Amino acid sequence: MPGAVPATAFGLIVDALRRRRAAGIAPFTVMSCDNLPGNGDVARSTITAFARLLDPELADWMREHVAFPNGMVDRITPVTSPEDVRRVADELGVDDGWPVVCEPFTQWVLEDEFPSGRPPFEDAGVQMVDDVVPFELMKLRLLNASHQALCYLGYLSGYRYAHEVCQDPVFVDLLLGYMREEGVPTLPEVPGTDLEDYTRTLVERFANPEVRDTLARLCAESSDRIPKWLVPVIRDDLDAGRPVERSALVVASWARYAEGVDEQGEPIEVVDHRKEAVMAAAARRAEDPLAFLRDPTLFGDLAERPAFTEPYLRHLESLHARGAHATTEAVVASLR
């Protein structure tokens, strides 16, 4: 409405651009610093849609003249614990109710789309690139998918932290094998990146005991994670005729975890916005071994693809009969 004072980020950005356009000043670049895939594209879509509600001509001008570069950031930041709060107070003398704990590693990749110029981001270690998509896929299919590869199997094996899992040679072999044989082959060329070095560095990062990233955090909201991070890898590998043994083990371990009881008979607190549906599907294994895969919104057509269902069923049976650690050890040994 005319004369309204902006009260949201959308309103402030649109009004600032409106004023620049009216004054004949070149528009600024809207740079996203979140970690949403395609964040610049999402920002362009939502902000120009907001502008169109106010002034269609302004929205058209924004579409033509305003840059929304995509960016990717990578740094493991586990949930803040009471111990972190106490440590900051004791060691630094700072009373911070929500300190952010993170690893030493950091990576920021940003598309070089700044029509009116930009600060020298390179001086701060930012990788300026033409296209951020290969870097996003690298992170999603190697780092994020590997987190899923270690969390369910690790939890069922009795571990509770990511660094504990990644100090176990059996799981290190599983993760490196998944990344090298199943994840990396699905990636486009990642400019300036040694993927072999990247995979080794990932395992080193996961094994850092100071990060203390909980498996419970990594296991949470799996119905949002597996379909975005691992299922595309499985689909690409199947379409190319490549093996999916390790990926099938990861999905089977999610199904086993989603039953809600660990190998000692203790309850597992499954945290997922689709908890009831996921646990119900896992519970139907006895009557339908493929029940967990029969949700096309999560797995597409994987339940209909024998090249995936055969190793999936074999691994799921072994997880029940032999346990997570023995199953992982057997899979790793069979693929050497």
Image (cartoon, grey):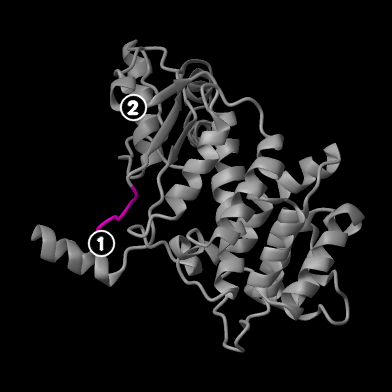
**Residue of label 1:** 98
Query: For the point 22% across and 66% down, which residue is it?
Result: 85
Give percent across and percent down for residue 234: 76, 48
| Badge 2 amino acid | Gly
Give percent across and percent down for residue 75: 40, 45
Q: Secondary structure at mark 2?
A: loop
Q: Residue furthest left?
A: 93
Contact between labelled residues 2 and 1, with CB atoms less than 8 Å apart: no
Query: For the point 54% across and 46% down, which residue is it?
Result: 143
Q: Nearer the viewer, residue 36 or 262?
A: 262
Asked whether residue 305 appears in the rendered view, the answer is: no
Residue 89: in magenta span: no
Query: Which span of residues is magenta-colored?
Result: 98-103
For label 2, the crowd category at 10 Å Cα-Cα, with few meaning under 14, some 14 to 19 and many 20 or more, is few
Q: Secondary structure at mark 1?
A: loop
Residue 100: in magenta span: yes
**Residue of label 2:** 125
Q: Specify whether 193 is left or right of 21.
A: right
Q: Is residue 252 above or below residue 23?
A: below
Q: Is residue 147 above or below residue 125?
A: below
| First in residue order: circle 1 vs circle 2 | 1
For label 1, the crowd category at 10 Å Cα-Cα, with few meaning under 14, some 14 to 19 and many 20 or more, is few
| Badge 1 amino acid | Trp
Query: For the point 32% across and 58% down, which residue is it?
Result: 210
Which is in the foreground here, disc 1 or disc 2?
Answer: 2
Give percent across and percent down for residue 46: 52, 37
